[in-house]
Structure formats: C-alpha cells, structure tokens
Amino acid sequence: MKVIIQIPCYNEEDALPISLKELPRQLDGVDEVEWLIINDGSEDKTVEKAIKGGADYVISHTNNLGLAQAFLSGMTAAIHFGADIIVNTDADNQYCAKDIQKLIAPILNNRAEYVIGTRPVKDIRHWSPLKKNLQFFGSWVVRKAAQTNVVDAPSGFRAIKRAAAMRLHVFNRYTYTIETIIQAGHLKIPMLCIPVRTNKEIRPSRLMSGIPNYLKRSFSTIIRSFMAYDPLRFFLIPATTFLAVTVILGMRYLYFFSIGEGKGHVQSLILALALFVLSTAFFIVGLLSDLIAVNRQILEGVDYRLRRLEAQKIENTSVESEHEIIFNRAYLVFHRKQINS
C-alpha cells in the first residue's frame, strides 16, 4: 500500500519548507509514503526548496496553468508512480499534517473512496464573518448540486483512492475543489467528511484574494459543473418555473375573459404564450443535454479503462520510459529514486 502526498505549488519558496517539515514519512496501514510536488510554473526557488526538503518527485509546468490543472497533473503523476491513495494538501501549511492518518483511515477501512477534510470554520480566527458565511453558503449550494453531504466544499485537504482518482476529470483552471465534488457525487463515488485541524496563517489565501472575483469564479464553476453532470435537472428548473408562470397568467386571462373583460388583458395572454415557448425550449434543451451527458458517461467509462491499461503498462516499464509515457507534454521531471540510483 503506497500513499503519495501531493502539493500543488506556485511561487512557494517561503511556505513550502514549513509544509514539508510537517509531512509524515510513516502512516499506519501503509507500506510506503512519498511526496510529490507540482510546480505550476513558479518563478522563484520553489523547485530547489522542494528537492532540498526531501520531495520524492517534482513535476514542473513550463508556465502557470492554474491550481486546477496542477491538481490534475499531480493526480495523473501519482497514479503512474503507483499511488494506492493520493493525499492532496496545500503549500501554505494550512492543514495539520498529523491529520493525514485520519484522512486516509476511511479508505483503508473501505468506508469511502474520496475523503474531504472539514475545517473548523467557526473557530478560524483570521477568517472574517463574511468569508465564513460565504463558505457555509457555497458548501450548501455544492451539496444541493452534487446531492452529497459535503460540509466544507472548498477544502483542499483530501484523500482519494486510486480507482476514484482515475474517474475524476477537471475542466476549469481556477480550482478543482467544487468540480470534483459535484462530479464524484454524480458518479456515486463513496465520499466522507472528516473533521481536521488547521494551522496558523502564514500567508493570505490566493484563491480568496478578492471576494467579488472569488464569487464570480466559484458560481460559474458550480453552474458549469451542474450543467455538465445533471443537465436535465438544471434545465427543468427554469422550464417548470416558466410553465408555472404561464399557467398563472393563463388562468388570470381566462378569469377576465369569463367576466367579459378579456380584451383589456390580451397582453397577459401574449406573455403567457411567450413564456410557454421558453419553457418548451428549456425542456427540449434539457432532454438533448441529457442525451449528450449519457454519451459523456460512456466516454468516461472508456477513459477509465484506458487509464487502468496505461497504469498496468507503466508498472512493467523502466523509470526512463515511464517518464516518456506520462510526461510527454511540456513537463520537467525530478525523480529522487532515479537520481540516487
């Protein structure tokens, strides 16, 4: 059983050494623990600090692709480096590394395949009341969209079983947290939330640098994910809303028509017809989108099988050819075992 702890990084030369000092090298129920750093086009000494701090692997994007793509690159690399469980944490040492044992326990016990660390949001002193309320509201929206019981949707402290990681995809460049929860919920991947501790803030959050920008990006991610994974339900909401208004306006017109005042309320009839057309259009779009979603599910199944075959193939190859297979794009790779051999 191998656990790989991955940390996406962008210009983290100051914070990364602090985080690496806290990471465990041994975990109960695990044979091997390795560290993977994803350098997302950093312009400082992040790579040097990672190697000096003991990272087993460092993969580097040649330019900054964003947190979501760094997370996805890390998962892909961790799978190919033989991880049975992938633990994701932040470079700013926000999460208590000692709770990694708690995070992986449900996976080791076969109770879950995707575990999310729930922060004690109410007790985090450096968070403003507005930020806390936004976190609660955002998590509630994600729960409704994903039909799960996730308490802390933006939390980046996560453990993912190998099989579940192979089924997840990330399409946006802002953050992976919301999209993967909605996706996992609709794929029926078993998820659990585990209370975890946090450390003192050593730098301000980069994702939450501006509340308006954060809200815009998070809302667009939720809407896009909802449309992709549950399109029929998404489009039925406006369709039924417009249909209900159509019925109300139609009954209103019929009432006035019955008492001989129909000519003065023709505009209600026209508006009702227009809304009925809109309702029908949304319903048809929902049906077509649902058919497309079915096709996407088939393709995801094919992709999952290809990933498994690729992983099995790499297990039988050398380290050098392994790098050629995995990182055939613009990646630079540091592999400590290869350097030391």
Image: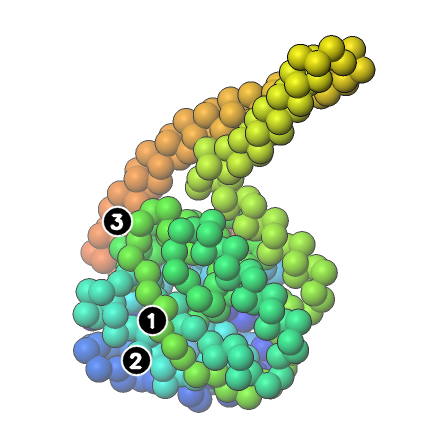
Of all residues, the one furthest to the front in this rendering is 259
Whether tag 1 and tag 3 are in contact, CB under 8 A, the answer is no
| Residue at x-position 25% and y-position 70% | 106
The numbered mark at residue 308 is: 3
Amino acid bearing label 1? Ile
Q: Which residue is mark 2?
A: 101
How far separated are the C-alphas under marks 3 and 2?
27 Å
Disc 2 on helix, strand or loop? Answer: helix
Query: Is residue 258 toward the left or the right of residue 68 in the image?
Result: right
Instruction: Give the crowd class for mark 1: few <14, some 14-19, many >=20 residues within 10 Å.
Output: many
Location of the N terminus by quadrant is bottom left
| Vertical comparison of 12 with 174: above or below | below
Residue mark closest to the camera, 3 vs 2? 2
Amino acid bearing label 3? Arg
Location of the C terminus by quadrant is bottom left
| Residue at x-position 51% and y-position 62% | 139
Q: Nearer the viewer, residue 231 or 200?
A: 231
Q: Which residue is mark 1?
A: 4
| Residue at x-position 50% and y-position 33% | 236
| Residue at x-position 19% and y-position 70% | 109
Amino acid bearing label 2? Gln
